[in-house]
Image: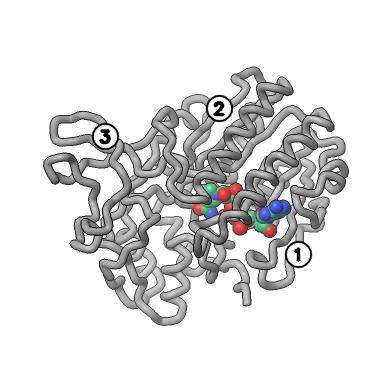
Amino acid sequence: MTTVLITGGAGFIGSAIVDAALEKGWRVRVIDSLRPDVHGGDYRADPRVEFITADVRDPDALAVALFGVDVVCHQAAKVGLGVSFEDAPDYVASNDLGTAVLLAAMARSDVERLVAASSMVVYGEGNYRDSSGRSRRPAARRVEDLDAGHFDPLDSDGRPLQPELITEDAPLDPRNVYAASKLAQEYLAAAWARSTGGRAIALRYHNVYGPGMPQNTPYAGVASLFRSALERGEAPRVFEDGAQRRDFVHVRDVASANLSAIESLAGPGEAFRAFNVGSGIVHTIGDLAHALSRNTGGPGPVITGEYRLGDVRHITASSERLKSELGWSPLVSFDAGMAEFASAPLRAAVT
Ligand SMILES: NC(=O)c1ccc[n+]([C@@H]2O[C@H](COP(=O)([O-])OP(=O)(O)OC[C@H]3O[C@@H](n4cnc5c(N)ncnc54)[C@H](O)[C@@H]3O)[C@@H](O)[C@H]2O)c1
């Protein structure tokens, strides 16, 4: 029987992985610090889970947590765009120091397999083509353009570039502290694999949504912000012009991607490999707001024209590598997922 240690297993995505692993009949251990800015109410673990309340930066707790473990599924992280640059030390400490301490403990315990949660944010702006069909990676958008309502990245002649699906071989270009900390986690995992003979997979999740999403933190995803607004009887407020392209992937599909990755590590393969995890279907933030308004019977979205400088304009994934190499496929369609999400329970508010 597989024994898996899921770090951050009390979180939004970690909980879905716990459920999926239990369903498979695996033995599940969780290490989670129950960060107070994440967990508002009491947290109750499934009684079938061996739950260790501890930080992944605690080597003594890790030594206990790793005992008898076949594979680690590393989800613990400080997530989201952050409130200000002053969050930087906490991102680096939680995500990078946390991963380094975990990997060192794995090296000591001879645990040789790792699946780590990464993110689409490692790509920065997505891939684009200019009007002559050449591939382009645009620079960060300029405040003057954004203020003028020109949200799409432009080519040198001032024409909007055409977005396309990003693949794992695209250049990496993290553009905020969270993104930098996620990419550093990947590099650490690759370095650990090379120096210990272990194997690691990084799963670059796109926009994950579904039951149990956090509802009121500055780190919450856009789907939950819209859902929470609608619950208060307010219209979802959509930044820019609502045409930002994203890939919304259901949390149960992300959990099944983790299980596929874990199972694949039992066979031969490269020391380190990264995979996009997305539905493969492009939707806009406006589509999302409309779908949630419709499904909740609430007010229609308001397009505000506001922007956040750290946001990328379009980022959508090709998940073909995950499908072809690991045999994964997403099962929850956008329509079915949004219909469920409109009334699904969200995670207790942090007060
Ligand atoms: N939610 C998304 O859309 C999304 C997208 C891309 C990547 N990710 C990644 O997926 C993973 C899970 O994200 P989530 O949305 O479930 O976040 P979450 O905040 O719901 O869960 C993270 C969990 O990790 C725990 N944790 C944080 N730091 C810890 C530490 N140092 N030691 C022990 N436990 C710690 C928290 O208490 C929490 O339970 C993260 O690595 C995140 O970067 C999430």
* Residue 221, placed above or below residue 329: below
Q: Is residue 221 left or right of residue 62?
A: left
Between the C-alphas of marks 1 and 3, the distance is 48 Å
Residue 38 at what x, y percent from top left? 64, 64
Q: Quadrant of the C terminus?
A: bottom right
The picture quadrant where one finds residue 135 is: top left
Looking at the rendered image, the disc whose residue lies closer to the viewer, 1 or 3, is: 3
Q: Secondary structure at mark 2?
A: strand
Instruction: Choose between 124 and 233: the one closer to the eye.
Output: 124
Residue on which the image places disc 1: 44
Q: Is residue 328 above or below residue 22?
A: above
Query: Which residue is located at x 35 percent, y 44 percent?
Result: 125
Which residue is label 3 attached to?
136
Callout 1: helix, strand or loop? loop
Q: Quadrant of residue 34?
A: bottom right
Callout 1–callout 2 Cβ contact below 8 Å: no
| Residue type at tag 1 | Arg
Q: Which residue is mark 2?
A: 273
Q: How is the image coloured?
A: one colour
Q: Residues within 10 Å of mark 3 (few under 14, many from 20)?
A: some
Q: Are marks 1 and 3 in contact (CB under 8 Å)?
A: no
Q: CA distance from mark 2 to mark 3?
A: 24 Å
Location of residue 307 in the rendering, given as x and y in whole percent from the top left corner? 32, 63
Give, as a three-letter code, the residue at label 2: Arg
Mark 1 or 3 closer to N-term?
1
Badge 3 marks a residue whose secondary structure is: strand
**In this image, 285 relative to 215: left or right?**
left
User: Residue drawn at (61%, 28%), measured in percent from left and top?
Assistant: 190
The amino acid sitting under disc 3 is Arg
Q: Position of residue 247 (x, y in %)?
A: 39, 48
Q: Marks 1 and 2: which is nearer the front? A: 2
